[in-house]
Every structure is written in C-alpha cells, then in structure tokens.
Image: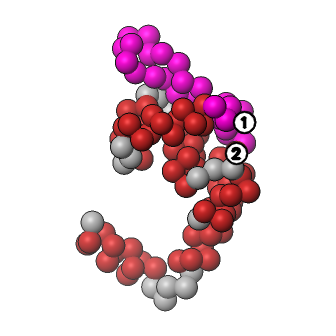
C-alpha cells in the first residue's frame, strides 16, 4: 500500500482519513463532520486522527474550522485538492488490494476467518 500511495504523497492513514471524509461528505453533504466523528467512523485514535488531519491541512487537502457550539471540536471540510487527491489515489489503492488479495483462492472464506479473529 505504501508503494501505491507514494506517487500521491499520502500515507495509508492519511488516505484512509481523507477518502473517508470525501465519502462521508458525499453521502451526508449537510452533516458537520467533526474530527471525533471521523475517528469513530474510521476506528482510529482521536489524537492520531487530529495529528494526521493537521498534516492534511498543511498539504491543502482539508480545512479544519472551529465548531460553532464546541470550542474544542473542529469541523472538517475537504478542499478541491483533497477531493482530487483521494479520488486519484483510490484507483491505485483498489489495484493494490486486488493484486494482494487476488491471490487468495476464496476471499470470502478468508474474510470470514478474519472476522472471527477480530
């Protein structure tokens, strides 16, 4: 995954958070997405999520605005650059997944076994 995302200038965690934010905005365009809600959706640590989002903000891919009702919270918005980066990287991520997992004779059985372990 690292090799697939390198040309896009994203780490795997950056991609997961950015792509998730793009997707969430597409299905719930009026929702004010907070960092905490994004961390919950992606099952990532809240503090790590905050740090990664600061990096994405520095790259011009995400905007973090103060929440009007909670001074500690941040409202997230993807920028056009962030949307473009997430969409461009998604094809390479899907190709890397297909290449890696395509070797399995029965992907469904493998997924079921992983679910048992989790």
Does the magenta portion include 76?
A: yes
Question: Could you tell whether 46 is left or right of 30 in the image?
Answer: left
| Mark carried by residue 114 | none
In the rendered image, the vertical position of residue 115 relative to residue 79, given as above or below: below
What residue is at 49 percent from the left and 89 percent from the top?
Answer: 105
* 29 or 12, nearer to the observer: 12
Looking at the rendered image, the quarter that the C terminus falls into is: bottom left
Residue that sits furthest to the top in the current view: 68
Residue corresponding to mark 1: 81
Crowd around label 2: few <14 · some 14–19 · many ≥20 (10 Å) = some
Which x, y percent locates residue 4? 66, 63
In the rendered image, the vertical position of residue 100 relative to residue 94, given as above or below: below
Per the rendered image, the range of residues in magenta is 58-84
Does the magenta portion include 36?
A: no
What residue is at 51 percent from the left and 40 percent from the top?
Answer: 52
Contact, CB < 8 Å: mark 2 with mark 1?
yes
Which x, y percent locates residue 75? 48, 23
| Mark carried by residue 85 | 2
Looking at the rendered image, the quarter that the N terminus falls into is: bottom right
Alpha carbon distance from label 2 to label 1: 6 Å
What residue is at 43 percent from the left and 28 percent from the top?
Answer: 34
């Amino acid at each position: 995954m690292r090799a697939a995302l390198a040309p896009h200038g994203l780490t795997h965690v950056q991609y997961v958070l950015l792509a998730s934010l793009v997707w969430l905005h597409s299905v719930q365009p009026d929702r004010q997405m907070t960092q905490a809600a994004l961390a919950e959706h992606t099952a990532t640590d809240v503090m790590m999520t905050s740090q990664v989002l600061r990096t994405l903000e520095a790259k011009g891919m995400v905007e973090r605005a103060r929440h009007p009702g909670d001074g500690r919270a941040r409202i997230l918005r993807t920028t056009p650059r962030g949307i473009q980066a997430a969409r461009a990287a998604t094809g390479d991520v899907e190709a890397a997944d297909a290449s890696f997992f395509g070797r399995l004779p029965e992907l469904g059985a493998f997924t079921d076994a992983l679910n048992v372990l989790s």
